[in-house]
Amino acid sequence: MKTIEELIQSATDLLQDLIRIQSFSGEEDQTATRIGQWLEALEIPFKRSGNNIYAFNRDYTEGKPLLLLNSHHDTVKPNSAYTRDPFTPEIADGKLYGLGSNDAGGPLVSLLACFAYWYPRENLSHNVVIVASAEEENSGPNGLNSMLKILPEVDVAIVGEPTLLDLAIAEKGLVIFDAEVHGTPSHAAHPNADNALYNCISVLEWFRAYRFPKISKVLGEVKLTVTQINGGTQHNVVPAKVDLVLDVRVNDRYTNQEIADILQAEAPCKVKPRSLRLNSSSIPADHPLVEAGVALGRQTYGSPTLSDQAALSCPSLKLGPGDSRRSHSADEFIYVQEIADGIQLYIRMLERFLAG
């Protein structure tokens, strides 16, 4: 079995290999293969479902609760502001540059190293499964959500995302709504007291002022933002309707269905949700997994960003090396030391949770 120091180096090497391989959402075939090769080199049996790679601890015992370790290996496409080759890993001043290095390559390889450390251990309180998942960035149908039909029931999960190694004990859900503001179409030269574009003014003011009353201690308010507006076809035609898009970030005091019901009943225009499946996530602050991290000096907080936690119905904790503010940025990077710190924190937390 490799030492922790050897696992840190192996994980860092793996991350550099993953950066070299294009793995946009839905195109993760080659990174899935590379992750499988890494597990194979450590003599860890694994399975593949689509572009998802998963493996169980060697001493898997029927009847024990299941701990899921999960992070993703797909990336967004690089933006035009890159000054470095996004597919060339480069270490400079302690930073490992490359697309997906921070989101979520660093957390992924750190969890893989942690799993490799615990893989041969016996008499653990939980069975352990690692899932290196696909299609997280586009919330696609062939990612972690597809794996939940294959895996045994998951009792608790760590989702690897960049959190500066603090403990995200809650995460906002997401509902995108399409809204329509209607009016009377006409020629622009004639009077029209029912112009759909002018009707938008009061509707937009309503959305800007609206507040959902239930406030979460961890996640704060539900956040509703109008993010898109589209209407009209040419300069001399008053349109029949204007289309709006609403981005609603849902706290843990509401289900997505409740948010949809409220807006459809109260909004001054027609609204329709695109999907209700990306619900908020949380884990009790007194859960042993959280307490294990707090005992090691980590802080808890509520996360406004979405992750694969949205696919889970069990208690889940978001935790990983790197900084969410670097995600999807130009010249993305993660500090090499953050990877080492992440691996050691994961291992030490599980020492308390699995073997304590």
Image: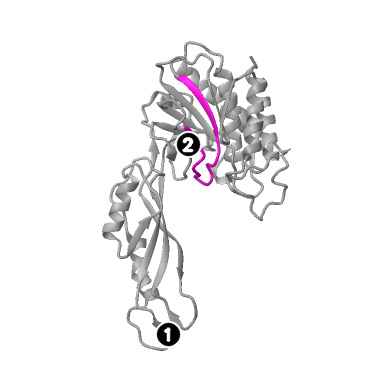
Disc nearest the viewer among 1 and 2: 2
Of residue 322 and residue 239, the one placed in the foreground of this image is 239
Q: Which amino acid does label 1 sit on?
A: Ala
Q: Determine whether 258 is above or below 37 in the image.
A: below
The residue indicated by pointer 1 is: 188
Residue 206 position by quadrant: bottom left
Evaluate if marks 1 and 2 touch, with contact meaning CB atoms under 8 Å apart. Answer: no
Q: What element carries label 1?
A: loop
Residue 123, percent from left and from top: 47, 11
Q: Determine whether 330 is above or below 115 in the image.
A: below
Q: Which residue is drawn at 41% across and 26% down?
A: 153
Residue 314 in magenta stretch: no
Q: Which residue is drawn at 60% across and 34% down?
A: 106
Residue 11 position by quadrant: top right
Q: In the rendered view of the protein, which quadrant contains the C terminus?
A: top left
Residue 191, percent from left and from top: 36, 87
Residue 143 in magenta stretch: yes
Relative side of 6 to 64, left or right? right
Of residue 101 and residue 279, the one placed in the foreground of this image is 279
The residue indicated by pointer 2 is: 146
N-term mark: 1 or 2: 2
Q: How many labels does the image show?
A: 2
Q: Determine whether 159 is above or below 184 in the image.
A: above
Of residue 230 and residue 85, the one placed in the foreground of this image is 230
Which residue is outermost to the top? 123
Q: Residue at x 58, y 36 (%)?
A: 51
Residue 345, percent from left and from top: 54, 25
Q: Which amino acid does label 2 sit on?
A: Ser
Between the residue at mark 1 and the residue at mark 2, the CA separation in whole angstroms equals 51 Å
Q: What stretch is highlighted in magenta?
A: 127-147
Q: Is mark 2 on a helix, strand or loop?
A: helix
